[in-house]
């Protein structure tokens, strides 16, 4: 029996089982769930903010392009075609 406690593989199995038990306790705790939900919510907010910022940049670029075309005296028929094709995407 004492040879069992000296066996390296035995201690690996014991450590693995203990790791599973502790891991399950950590994963099912309410605090872990709260932290996970908060992390995902912050990630979603960052994603929405990034999408909004990109859309604002696109709108500003379109405004600048339109202003440049009108200042140059070019027709804006090309822009209306681009607007309809980008809406389809």
Image (spheres, grey):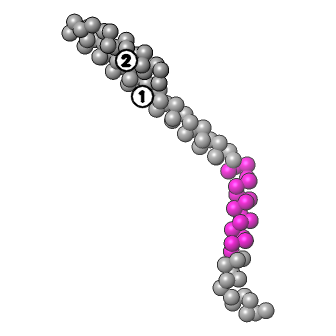
Which residue position holds label 2?
82
Of helix, strand and loop, which one carries label 1? helix
Disc on the earlier residue, 1 or 2: 1
Q: In the rendered view, would you say 12 is above or below 73?
A: below
Q: Residue 5 — which label?
A: none
**Residue at 74% across, 89% down:** 4
Of helix, strand and loop, which one carries label 2? helix
Depth check, front residue: 44 or 73? 73
**Cα distance between the residues tagged 1 and 2:** 18 Å
Label 2 environment density (alpha carbons within 10 Å; few <14, some 14–19, many ≥20): few
Q: Pointer 1 and pointer 2: residues touching (CB < 8 Å)?
A: no
**Residue at 32% across, 9% down:** 77
Q: In the rendered view, would you say 64 is above or below 9?
A: above
Q: Can residue 76 be seen in this view?
A: yes
| Percent position of residue 39, x then y | 59, 43
In the displayed structure, does residue 60 sit left or right of residue 11?
left
Residue 17 among magenta residues: yes
Quadrant showing the N terminus? bottom right
Which residue position holds label 1?
54
| Percent position of residue 3, x then y | 73, 93
Q: Give the range drawn in magenta.
A: 15-32
């Amino acid at each position: 029996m004492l040879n069992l406690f000296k066996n390296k593989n035995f201690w690996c199995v014991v450590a693995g089982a203990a790791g599973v038990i502790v891991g399950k306790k950590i994963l099912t705790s309410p605090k872990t769930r709260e932290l996970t939900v908060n992390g995902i919510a912050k990630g979603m907010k960052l994603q929405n903010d990034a999408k909004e910022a990109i859309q604002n940049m696109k709108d500003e670029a379109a405004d600048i392009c339109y202003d440049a075309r009108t200042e140059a005296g070019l027709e804006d028929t090309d822009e209306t075609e681009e607007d309809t094709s980008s809406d389809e995407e």
